[in-house]
Amino acid sequence: MIKERLPQMALARVSVKMATSTKERRYFGTDGIRGRVGVSPITPEFVLKLGWAVGKVLARNGSGKVLIGKDTRISGYMFESVLEAGLSAAGIDTHLLGPMPTPAIAYLTRTLRAQAGIVISASHNPYYDNGIKFFSAQGTKLPDDVELAIEGQLAQPMTTVDSAALGKAIRIVDAPGRYIEFCKSTVSSSMILNGLKIVVDCAHGAAYHIAPNVLRELGAEVFELGVEPNGLNINLECGATHPDKLRAEVLARNADLGIALDGDGDRVVMIDHRGHVLDGDDLLYIIVKHKAKFGLMKGGIVGTVMSNLGFEQSVTQLGLDFIRTPVGDRYIMAELVNRGWSLGGEPSGHIVCLELTTTGDGIITALQVLAAMHDENSSLAAMCCGLKKFPQILLNIKVNQIASPMDNPRIQQAVKDIESVLGTRGRVLLRRSGTEPLMRIMVEGEEEVQVKKLAGQLADVVTTEFAVEG
């Protein structure tokens, strides 16, 4: 069982309506600051000043320390150095964790009593992107007012404290071991995975030295994929966003299941022994159904606008409330805290188990699924019984404008036309990505052929109206 009680997370109480608050910001999006390395704002000069600005804001609450962790992309070395320099110039000490999953940095920020944690990662993006995101002392995303204060500080000239007051830097050498022990503590000590054959794909990312060891120490026979990072291969045709290699390996080894993480370890998809891919909706349903069966549910379930309609119906059939938020685990987290609930997630594989941790965590999610399998002596495939998802087509269209799609009359009409066809038995969603130059299209309904056709029609309109690049 979990060994510690999570602290009161008042800082996570951010309104779900904050989708509109990002308009006030120049740099911060829904998940920190992200972009192409060498292109503003993801440049050494900007990140140096960002570190300084963060340090100045934190210094207002007294001296303290900041943790810095990163994934395995090559630019992480550069940004780690300049962040450390900027924080030092503001008089803040830094503790360097090296390559660590994003949720591990949230956990260590809390347990090491740091003022904040900084993650250098672009999550599931290719190696040539990078980003900076932050955690509060409680291991939650930074509150809006702190992010806005940092943006305000960025507008000021950079200064340096007196030499005697400069921040120092040390490296935390036992960070991986600390997090491995935490992961194991989130399941019962009676859960032993002896005899279970698991293939794990770490996407050549931050969990490459964590996830396989967690599973082995719990007794599983583990086969590894994506555990040889070279700075350039993170997320490259592997991991949670590209599970084909994992699927092939599960079938070739006659394994019981496969686990695929993304580059920073905060999302997960799984493969059953038949080779079927289970996304975040499937995994969350397994966890929810298991907890409901044993009377362990705390409140309802939080999904996002991307959650499958079939998932929503299956959850409500269990007698549980279900609500949707905008895409992003910070919105899920905020709604869970506001309602006093404990479980939420999205199809991408970001799942928040609030009774165990303070952010989406791919390893802990996988362990919760394994715990449900263990308790019910069931296969992964059988655990999904009862969930019937609607066909859902997702398309990403590259765009070179920063306009809102719903401000365009032709797109507005196209969406209305599709909604008219689908009626109450389907949905259409069009939104800009918060992390990439993409327009995301989702059409969902009962008939797959119809859904594909309607999604293609909307994609054609978007392509024409937004003058996409090839």
Image (spheres, helix red, strand yellow):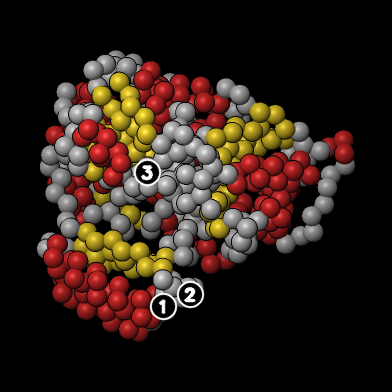
Q: For the residue marked with disc 1, what is the amino acid?
A: Phe
Residue 93 falls in image quadrant: top right
* Up-down relation of residue 39 to residue 408 (above or below): above
Q: Is residue 100 visible?
A: yes
Kind of element beneath mark 1: loop
Residue 347's disc number: none
* CA neighbours of label 2 inside 10 A, class few (<14), some (14 to 19), many (20+): few
Disc 1 + disc 2, Cβ < 8 Å: yes
Quick one: label 1 or label 3, which is nearer the N terminus? Answer: 3
Q: Which residue is mark 3?
A: 238
- Toward the viewer: 243 or 137? 243
Is mark 3 in CB contact (under 8 Å) with mark 2? no
Amino acid on which the number 2 mark rests in the picture: Gln
Q: Secondary structure at mark 3?
A: loop
In depth, the one of 205 and 56 nearer the eye is 205
Left/right placement of residue 448 relative to residue 57 reads left
Tell me where residue 239 appears, x and y as whole percent.
37, 42
The percent coordinates of residue 118 (x first, y second) are: 59, 42
Q: Which residue is mark 1?
A: 466
Nearer the observer: mark 1 or 3; the answer is 3
What numbered label is drawn on residue 401? 2
Tag 3: amino acid: Cys
